Amino acid sequence: MKEQYEKLEELLDYYSDNYNNINSDQEAIKQLLHETQEIFDYLPADALQKISDKFDIKLSALSAFIKLIPQLKGENFKHKLTVCSGPRCGAKGGATILNAVEKELNVKPGKVTKDGTFLLVTQNCLKKCKTSPNIKIDEDIYHNVTVQNIPNIIKKYKK
């Protein structure tokens, strides 16, 4: 852990030396966040605080980057499980699917499971309306999901 923070300090020094006004350079901030994530495998709160302090960038701005850039992880998890909450999925039992996933993982949307395996989120539409209800784990989309097949789908990712 100490080695990771030493690498972070080196990275922050590099950006400080090579970017005059990083807090107004969105591409540089994006790159800094990606490189920080490479060090930790996600973006821990204390690393974000160090970036904020060093470059006078508001934490809320860093959080916005994390939310807008799918490759950035603000929490440590292995898989992102997305339940479609769009109108078609909703009409075909999307809320029931979400409840079943919450129960199976013992977590609410926006939270990470205790074992760090899943981040559960909802998305207004996965654009696969013909095969609703749908869930997505990382880049894998599951169609015509039923409450009964949720445990088997999730089990594939727990290994």
Image (cartoon, grey):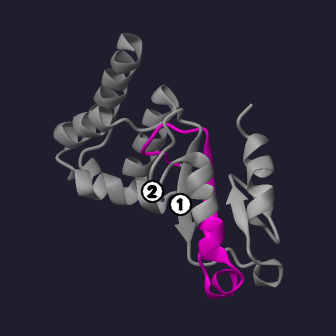
> Is residue 85 inside the magenta stretch?
yes
Estimate the x, y position of residue 105 in percent, counting from the top left.
58, 47
Please, which residue is most extreme toward the top here? 2
Dot 2 falls on a residue whose secondary structure is: loop
Do the CB atoms of the residues marked 2 and 1 lie less than 8 Å apart? Answer: yes
In the picture, measured across the screen, residue 143 lies left or right of residue 45, that is right
Is residue 58 highlighted in magenta?
Answer: no
The residue labelled by disc 2 is 110
x%, y% of residue 131?
Answer: 83, 78
Q: Amino acid at mark 2?
A: Gly
Highlighted range, magenta: 72-98
Residue 21 visible in the current orientation:
yes
Image quarter in which the N terminus is found: top left
Residue drawn at point x = 53 percent, y = 47 percent? 106
The one of 44 and 53 positioned closer to us in this rendering: 44
Which residue is denoted by mark 1 in the rendering?
A: 121
Q: Is residue 137 above or below residue 157?
A: below
Q: Residues within 10 Å of mark 2 (few under 14, many from 20)?
A: few
Name the quadrant of the C terminus.
top right
Residue at the (79%, 59%) spot, across then down? 148
